[in-house]
Image (cartoon, rainbow, N blue to C red):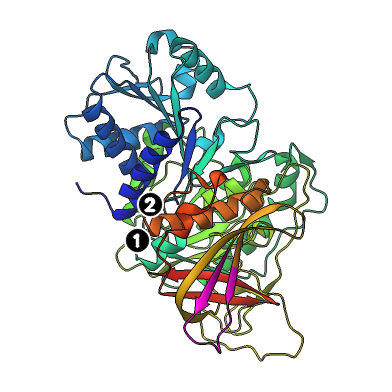
Amino acid sequence: MALRDYQQRAIDMLNDWFTRHPEGHPVIEMPTGSGKSHVIAAYCQEALREWPETRILMLTHVKELIEQNASKMREYWPTAPLGIYSAGLRQRDASQSIVFGGVQSLARKADEIGHVDLLIVDEAHRIPAGAAGQYRKLIDDLTAINPALRVIGLTATPYRLGHGMITDPPALFSSLIVPVTYMELLKAGHLARLTCKRTATTYDLDNVRRRGGEYVEADLDAAVNDLKTNDDVAAEIIQHAGERRSWIVFAVSVAHAYGLRDALLRQGVTAATVVGETPSEERAEIIAAFKRGEIQAITNANVLTTGFDAPNVDLIGACRPTLSTSLYVQMLGRGTRTAEGKKDCLVLDFAGIVSTHGPFDNPRPRKPGQKAGDAPVKACPECDTLVHLSVMECPTCGHVWERKPPSLKLHDDPILSDAAEETIPVTSWNWSVETSAAGKKMLSVRYYPRSLSQPIIRENFVVWHGGSATYMAMKRLAAIAARVNGTISGIENGIDELQGWPCPKEISFRRNGKYYDVTRRSW
């Protein structure tokens, strides 16, 4: 089975990172639905081909992901020396060169696993920044056995509630590798578009307390889970769904999940519920029936955010308010896979999470202590699709807003960030290191247009500022490097390599006051 170009790029960038960094642990960010499991399989095969004595432990937190990743490995490499160690799957084989395991089963079993050269962690954002927790204990114990152990993380959401980026100290991971973005995969046809509608039914969270940076579940349940509200939500889902036939609804609690299911059933929708206590066989039957189209809607509470692969999902009922950017992206990511006859996936944002966290493809993870803020959003008067204030033409129905004299600062679309753009041809570019208004060092590149009547576009990369700003800058820089077969692992030593990169033939940008936001580069 051949890898897609961006999947091979992920492996190439990872190998390059290890060549340049004799110490440390990288994490690869790849969008939901991009095929991380194929990358894992190919990388393991390559490692064992080059170094047959290598021992690899593939670790995650739920049995569904263990089973899914192992299945993809066998599909990609039928003769792989593969064992599974998971109490939930009733298998305990730690003798193979590659072991797929659950952290709960292995947290205190480092001695049984023995020497490990590579530890690959799927859903790596679940590893806490501090020294506590099952992941860190197992990593510490395995490092005691093999001090040369290297850890590779994979995730679609490289940030963690209450900490920020999972590469911010004192985190385990030291560098972020970004081989591809959601928007690149969307434009290539590998992922489906998300659209978002305004809902008449909303939740009042004024009396909901917060603890540890997240809403208190009991307070949330009291605020959102009552018979009338659930009936209103169900009626509105049915109203907006149209011909959509595969709905997933995210609820606050087990009681809320069942309440929403019952509301849908009362209004004639075939619906089922999956929660943590649902027996494995029953859960598998429900999901299989959903994929076959026999069940139209699944409601769930904190279950189907990871390890759930149903490409047919074409409507998401976001009924679960959250302050976690990771959970936000994980929930909406369930709708990004493509399927035959699927045009897009509609997000009905009852919980207001889009305005809390920003565009799905460019969210705003908050630093510890930073308060949540709402993105400026407007609703199309014709079809109720939510767009950012900067969008002048509705992407759903084509409605055009009248331009008004006061200028508005341009931002990203709240659900996706591909607002109206200008495109110009480019003849050359020049990289430099400059000082930002905050007095910190930053990278800057100037794109020189073909025509003197067109502006010189300057793009800044605040790669040394830290936090989410640096994360977004590194993500954009990594996307450029991937297109030119370059690397960004040495930028701390200067910009000589960047100067040698071939410049794009054209760029697209949006005007942002007196500045420009570069949205696309074509080579």
The vertical placement of 150 against 474, above or below, is above
Q: Residues within 10 Å of mark 1 (few under 14, many from 20)?
A: some
The vertical placement of 327 against 276, above or below, is below
Identify the residue shown where x is 35% and y is 65%.
188
Identify the residue shown where x is 38% and y is 52%.
34
Identify the residue shown where x is 58% and y is 74%.
457
The residue where tag 1 is placed is 190
Asked if residue 107 shows in the view, the reply is yes
Give residue 46's mark: none
For the view shown, which residue lies furthest in the left direction? 79
Three-letter amino acid code of the residue under disc 1: His
The residue where tag 2 is placed is 34
Q: Which residue is at the front of the view, 282 or 364? A: 364
Q: Which residue is at the front of the view, 92 or 139? A: 139
For the view shown, which residue lies furthest in the top direction? 111
| SS for callout 2 | loop
Three-letter amino acid code of the residue under disc 2: Ser
Q: Magenta span has 447?
A: yes
Residue contact between numbered discs 2 and 1, judged by CB atoms under 8 Å: yes
Identify the residue shown where x is 46% and y is 72%.
428
Span highlighted in magenta in the image: 445-458
For the view shown, which residue lies furthest in the front direction? 496
Whichever of callouts 2 and 1 sits on the residue coming sooner in the sequence is 2
Q: Which residue is at the front of the view, 81 or 470? A: 470
